[in-house]
Amino acid sequence: MANEFLVFDRVTKRFGALTAVDNVSISIKKGEFFSLLGPSGCGKTTLLRMLGGFERPDSGRIYLDGKDITDAPPNMRRVHTVFQNYALFPTMTIWDNIAFSLRLAKKPKAEIEETVDEMLEMIKMSEHAWKYPSMLSGGQKQRVAIARALVDRPQVLLLDEPLAALDLKLRQHMLLELDTIHDQVGITFMYVTHDQGEAMSLSDRIAVMNSGHVEQLDTAAKIYEAPKSAFVASFIGDTNFFEGEIVSEEGDYCTISVPGFASVCAFNDRKLAVGQSVHLSVRPEKIRVTLAPPPPEKGARINVFESTVKDIIYQGVYTKYWLESVGKRVQALKPHSRFLLDQETITWNDKVYIWWHPDDGYMVEDASNENVL
């Protein structure tokens, strides 16, 4: 714990009969961009509010830079929050909004002017300094809110769904802005979101939360490619679940008998034995969809199934297919890496083949998910 900058140590918070956060322990490094990701009601905002001093844990402790801040009031913590609704002062100019906390701390006038001008330059808003919040776009307001929270250099910046009110294009732009600002200031960012795309785009590490617990804490790539549970696999992107029993083993691979479907070959990364239950996740982009069967590969254990196309959604960079295969519904994704109009056309009710390599599935701990096949 001594080597970590921000630590939640076995923290629990209840609201009546509801346990919002249940014995959570998280360690965050100095300067890290760390995200709490999960559905509404999973406990992520409660964790954020406890760090900000707006809620007190019923048990457990919170440490910041080696100091126990569990009982410290909000104004005694160098922790600032950026809210979804910006919370700017409407009667103050942008310059005055950013300068507010420095004036409250009675900083010298020259220092205030220099610092505020630096922040305006950082957020590319110098030409808007004397405007009022009502004159700005949503993205501009969000940048001002971030600058105001960063102007006196907090130890941690908390961002609670900061992009939720913005449209898609602006959110994508602000993701780049946030990443750039974080790189410039080097302050620890703790970001709360229910949007997996935001978390994966920005974060050094992500804690995926569910019902007050941390289901998995890891880098975006590991959470996506190697989810620990069915909940993580389904919440981070789309996936297909295959539930069954191991009926044979051959080296590092095994054959899974899936009731009502067929036998599936998979890399046995969990080293399960014959007779054990297994829950396999296969991402849609790992599954190929073709009108002809795949060419034979020497020594390969390719999973191949005849299917019928039931639904198609064209989304520009890729097409999503929903297929009926041996009585089961499977989702596949075909990227458009080549000029689409020169490729074979697959349409509704076509008889096709779906196939994937055994290495492209991943075994998860449980299948407690409504999408399990």
Image (cartoon, helix red, strand yellow):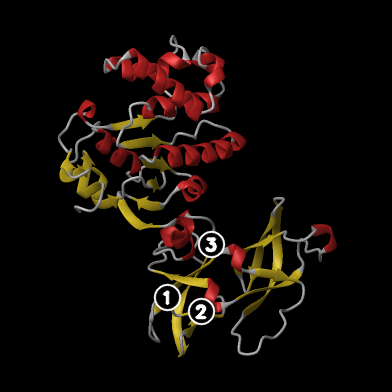
User: Which residue shows up at 44% across the image and 38% down it?
Assistant: 184
Q: Is residue 7 left or right of residue 296?
A: left
Q: Residue 13 at x, y = what percent?
A: 22, 42
Number of callouts in the render?
3
Q: Is residue 229 left or right of residue 342?
A: left
The amino acid beneath tag 2 is Ala
Q: For the residues marked 1 and 2, what is the alpha-carbon distance in whole angstroms? A: 10 Å
| Residue 330 visible somewhere in the drawing | no
Q: Earlier in the sequence, mark 3 or mark 2?
A: 3
Q: Which residue is mark 1?
A: 278
User: Which residue shows up at 36% across the image and 58% down it?
Assistant: 216
Q: For the residues marked 1 and 3, what is the alpha-carbon distance in whole angstroms? A: 16 Å
Nearest to the observer: residue 229 or residue 225: 225
Nearest to the observer: residue 31 or residue 223: 31
The amino acid beneath tag 3 is Thr
Q: Which residue is mark 2?
A: 266
| Residue 158 visible somewhere in the drawing | yes
Q: Nearer the viewer, mark 1 or mark 2?
A: 2
Residue at disc 3, secondary structure: loop
* Label 1: few (<14), some (14–19) or many (≥20) C-alpha neighbours in 10 Å: many
Q: Is residue 358 left or right of residue 184?
A: right
* Label 3: few (<14), some (14–19) or many (≥20) C-alpha neighbours in 10 Å: many
Q: Which residue is mark 3?
A: 239
Are the residues tagged 1 and 2 within 8 Å (C-beta)? yes
Q: Is residue 336 left or right of residue 271?
A: right
Q: Residue 277 at x, y = what percent?
A: 40, 77
